[in-house]
Image (cartoon, helix red, strand yellow):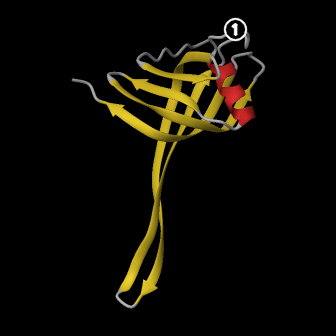
Amino acid sequence: MSVTLLTGKSATFSYDGVSGSMQITSFTTDQTADSETVETLAGSAALSAQKEYTATVSFLFDGTISGATNFYKAVQAAYEDGLPGAITFAIGGFSEDGDATVTGLTKDVPADAQITCEATFLCTGMTPTYPA
């Protein structure tokens, strides 16, 4: 049996009085910008631009889903309600925080009982903090 220990990578999510931090096994962000263009007499013009920031976080299930300090419970409640919560990602000395709506949540329960989860967030107002 092998064990992989990852340090310095965490996510904290708070929703409706429930908050939890989780050491994450992977973290992927995607930033995209969409704009609608129209043809005018002067050429093409962009009417609007929408930027999206999505984050996918993989983590080990943190056990019971009772209590007010549980990462999975907070993420699951926000997913079911479809409302945003506060999120912070911290990787080494870098962190980023803002609001996030959970757009996807999966849980994998293999035979060895090492339960892994993945949550996808649509993030807004993300503010980065860089190491000194």
How far from the left and from the top, in percent, is residue 123?
52, 40
> At 70% from the left edge and 33% from the top edge, which residue is drawn?
79
How far from the left and from the top, in percent, is residue 105?
69, 34
How far from the left and from the top, in percent, is residue 42?
34, 88
Q: Nearer the viewer, residue 58 or 99?
A: 99
In the rendered view, tell whether residue 33 sits above or below residue 38.
Answer: above
- Residue at the disc numbered 1: 67
Q: Nearer the viewer, residue 6 or 123?
A: 123
Q: Circle 1 — which element?
A: loop
Crowding near the residue tagged with mark 1, few <14, some 14–19, many ≥20 C-alpha atoms within 10 Å: few
In the rendered view, tell whether residue 42 sits above or below residue 55.
Answer: below
Q: Is 62 placed left or right of 31 in the picture?
A: right
> At 46% from the left edge and 18% from the top edge, which residue is drawn?
6
**Identity of the residue furthest to the right in this view:** 111
How far from the left and from the top, in percent, is residue 38?
47, 80
Image-quadrant location for residue 20 = top right
For the N terminus, the image quarter is top right
